[in-house]
Image (cartoon, helix red, strand yellow):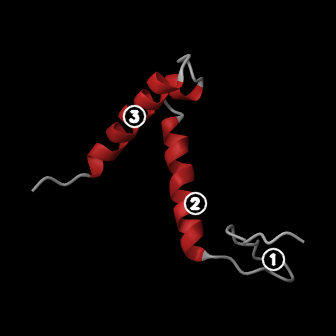
Amino acid sequence: MANIEAVIPAKRNRIDPSSHDAEKYKWRNLVARLFYKLKNWRRVATRHDETREPYLGFVSIAAVKLWLPFVHWA
C-alpha cells in the first residue's frame, strides 16, 4: 500500500476510523474555500484568457479583492 497520509476525517459512523492530521485538514479546507470563491468570477472559472500571465494576473486581482475586507487598517 502507498504511504498516503489521511487529511480528511473519516465519517462518524465508520467502524474502524483512520486518524487524520487536523492541522493539514484546516489548511486544505481554507484553500478549497478560496478556490470556490475565486470560481464565482466567470473569467476565472472558464479560463477565458489564452495565456498563463493574464489568467494568473486576474486570479491575483480577485484574491486581493477577496482579502481586502479582512484587512484592518490602523
Q: Nearer the viewer, residue 11 or 8?
A: 8
Q: Which quadrant of the structure image shows residue 21? A: bottom right
What residue is shown at x 51% (from left), y 22% (from top)? 43
The residue that label 1 is drawn on is 13
Label 2 crowd (10 A; few <14 / some 14-19 / many >=20):
some
Question: Does residue 69 sit above or below 25 in this rendering?
Answer: above
Q: Earlier in the sequence, mark 1 or mark 2?
A: 1
Question: Does residue 46 sit above or below 30 in this rendering?
Answer: above
Q: Nearer the viewer, residue 66 or 24?
A: 24
Horizontal placement of 21 versus 34: left or right?
right
Horizontal placement of 65 versus 59: left or right?
left
Label 3 crowd (10 A; few <14 / some 14-19 / many >=20):
some
- Mark 3–mark 2 distance (CA, rounded to whole Å): 20 Å
The residue that label 2 is drawn on is 28
Going by the numbered disc 1, the residue's amino acid type is Asn
Going by the numbered disc 3, the residue's amino acid type is Ala
Horizontal placement of 73 versus 70: left or right?
left
Picture coordinates of residue 58, whole percent (x, y): 42, 28
Q: Nearer the viewer, residue 21 or 69?
A: 21
Q: Earlier in the sequence, mark 3 or mark 2?
A: 2
